[in-house]
Amino acid sequence: MAEIDYNDEASIVTALKDQQFFVITLSPTAPRDTHSKLVQAAAKAGVPYVLPNYYGGDILNVTFGEDTMLGPIAKSQRMEIEELGMSWITVCCSFWYDYSLAGGEARFGFDFDKKTFTVYDDGNTRISASTLKQVGLAIAKILSLKELPENEGDGSLTLSSFVSNGIYVKSFAITQNEMFESVKRVTGTTDADWTITHENTQQRYQDGLAQIRSGNRVGFSKMLYARGFFPSECNDLSDKAQNKLLGLPEESLDEATNDAVNLVKVLAQRVERMAA
């Protein structure tokens, strides 16, 4: 454990000395220059590999990246890493399942407190989603690999085979309706306990953009998740998922849903403590 000051580069450089791989995980609310500060410090510390703060869609899907505004930001982060002489590996995991399910109506459409469920179109668009645990396991697997092949005939998996590329991970290929069935099983509820409404994803996406342009940051999640559920181009990485290659486990949907329900309770408790 090393204590740092984001405004004191020397403290970050000291913390990163003799480290081979730097995994960056920043809150969406972190100041915009924080990522660059960390990357620059890593370069001065001599860190060869960086995993930037991007955990989302396919980095090769330029249209999706532009539509959600995340693509250009992530690309500039990767370019800075390269320009500073380091290598990057990023994580393409689509939406975090437990985090998104617990995150309110703006994400997967669920508000557990109000027992409301907003269905995007007919609720049957299939996307891929990854639990926080599965993403962590994927990164741990990459870090456990040897750096380079031992010789020309060495065909084993190495860290170098993932450099300048994405690690493609998923937990589930799932629709909103399938999420709802899992939610009802876990919470012991029925349709009658929920208020269910429908929204068009195209319109929801445009509404989110309008909120962002008016300065309402709540619109970002609305825009992002609606775009991920476009029937014509949904955020499904199933065909590229490298779960078997990485030896990742099969997961239980209901267990992941239960984790999300528990996360809702934890967040509610935090709000109560802050209000006290």
Image (spheres, rainbow, N blue to C red):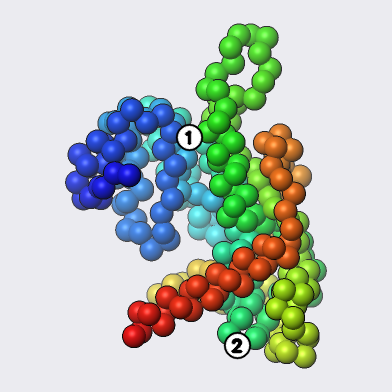
Q: Is residue 58 visible?
A: no
Give residue 167's mark.
none
x 67%, y 20%: residue: 156
Question: Which corner quadrant of the image does residue 252 belong to?
Answer: bottom right
Q: Check disc 2 and give the amino acid type.
A: Lys
The one nearer the camera, 230 or 146, is 146
The percent coordinates of residue 186 (x first, y second) are 72, 74
**Image position of 95 with respect to 266: above or below:** above
Q: Residue 240's x, y, as percent? A: 72, 42
237 left or right, relative to 276: right
Amino acid found under the numbered disc labelled 1: Trp
Pick whichever, 52 or 157, lies toward us: 157
Left or right: 179 as drawn, with respect to 131: right
Where does the image place residue 272, in percent across and percent down from the top left?
41, 82
> Nearest the camera: 63 or 14?
14
Count of numbered badges drawn on the protein: 2
Which quadrant of the figure contains the C terminus? bottom left
Residue 258 lies in quadrant: bottom right
> Is 259 displayed left or right of 184 in the figure?
left
C-alpha gap between disc 2 and disc 1: 42 Å
Residue 72 in sight from this viewpoint:
yes
- Badge 1 crowding class, 10 Å Cα cut-off, few under 14, some 14 to 19, many 20 or more, is many
Are circles 2 and 1 on residues that touch, CB within 8 Å? no
Task: From the image, tell me which residue sits under label 2.
Answer: 114
Along the polypeptide, which appears first: circle 2 or circle 1?
A: 1
Residue that appears at 78% across and 69% down: 178
- Does dot 1 land on a helix, a strand or a loop? strand
The dot on residue 88 is: 1
Q: Secondary structure at mark 2?
A: loop
Could you tell me which residue is drawn at 67 percent across and 57 percent down?
A: 129
Residue name at image x 43 percent, y 61 percent: 28
